[in-house]
Image (cartoon, rainbow, N blue to C red):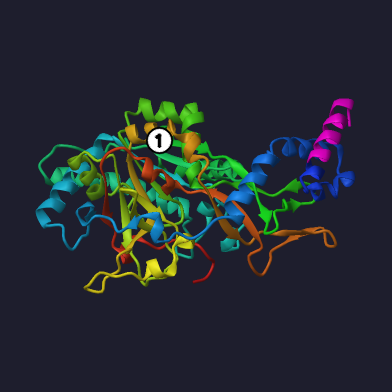
Amino acid sequence: FEMESAEDYSAIRQRFEDKGQGHVFNYFDDYSEEEKAAFIEQCKEIDLDEFERLYQEVCLNQTKVDEHDGIEPIDKDLIHSFSTIDEETKQKWTFTGAQQIVKGTVALMVFAGGMGTRLGSSDPKGMYDIGLPSHKSIFQIICEKFIRVQSYAAEICQRAGMNCAARFRCVLYIMTSGVNDKTTRDFFAQNENFGVPEDRLVFFKQASLPTFSFDGKLMMEDSTKIAIGPNGNGALFEALRSDQVLKNSISENKVEYIHLVGVDNILNKFLDPIQIGLAYTKGLKGCSKFSQKMYPEEPIGIFVKKGGKIDIIEYTELGEDMAKQTYEDGTLKYNQGNIINFLLHVETLNDLVSKADILNSLYHKAIKKMPVYNEKTGTSEKPDKENSYKLELYIHSFLPYVEGSYELIEGIRSEEFCPIKNKEG
């Protein structure tokens, strides 16, 4: 160590000791000089006071909602089910949406910051081969659907008598994270972006947070690194605020609506003309797709009305009694499941970015299986059961902050919802 580094080390180690996190230095004396410098830099980036506050407030004090929280079902006139939309309206919305896709006024944004750990893979989740005969990765499937829907939109316009060809003007935005950004970019480059034009593809990174055990102790990725992971898809708003390349792309390409989706639901109808047409026809600030629940306690977030605003209650926060409430005809009151499918007007996004400080405080706890470093074997081993907390910002936390009209449209479950979460099942 140089003198400055030695002083950094002493002060930083004392700070970690004072916060009960001194165990992260257990192997420090065995590091190379390069590893020591890298570890100190990683420690500098961790705000222990904020970490401790989040652990106390989010992990230890988080409670389920109850009747006193003012939860109500969504107003029925804001919900569009395919069984209740007449054919003329469907055609109108589909044609309107197709026109906008051809113009390139809508963009697709995929949340792809996670790794395929639960799938038994050490690669980004989007690189996972889901077992199709073609052995296509999730990323390849998304890109091919992104290209195909633009051709489909042009065909719709042609059938309506318009003289237009597929122009492929829509932009694809991929949100990565510190743990998978380079690997993801390299994967796309090696595969010629799966046919997506270079000038229609933009990568950007979300922020990361440490992972920690149930008793609030920082975990080690290996003997030289503290375990760090992406802080959830709700990190989008901070990324939009801080990434100038991303902001410039949205502005320069005159994007009006952005379709936000998760990487793991390959059945998502990316840039669905009918959803886009609904938003444009009614001048909505945004609209989401939902899927009906299979059973009351299904582990899926639920759209609700809270304080007069559309919101989502995460399944881990939904009480059993509320989940089972029904109308007189026996249908569930809380039946609109979140499939991470949000279409937002760019003006709405910009307004939400101005509220990023608020949105950045709305953390949730996720219970995860995280590899544990074994000093006897010198390797990181996967546990048999959940062993850690990970703090995440959920994208749907923005809903109560939307100013203006927001509606829901149904996605047929068998056709549009099949998230790839685990290796089996």
- Magenta stretch containing residue 12, yes or no? yes
**Front one among 44 and 244:** 44
Residue name at image x 25 percent, y 74 percent:
330
Residue name at image x 44 percent, y 62 percent:
318
Q: Position of residue 376 (x, y in %)?
A: 85, 62
Name the magenta segment's main secondary structure: helix
Label 1 sits on what residue type?
A: Leu
Q: Position of residue 417 (x, y in %)?
A: 37, 61
Q: Is residue 420 left or right of residue 33?
A: left
Residue extent of the magenta highlight:
1-15
Residue at image mark 1: 352
Res 315 → quadrant:
bottom left
**Front one among 109 and 155:** 109
Residue name at image x 82 percent, y 58 percent:
378
Q: Using the rendered image of the protein, determine whether residue 154 is visible from the camera's viewpoint.
A: no
Q: Is residue 176 left or right of residue 40?
A: left
Q: Using the rendered image of the protein, determine whether residue 365 is visible from the camera's viewpoint.
A: yes
Q: Position of residue 20 (x, y in %)?
A: 78, 48
Q: Is residue 404 left or right of residue 395?
A: left
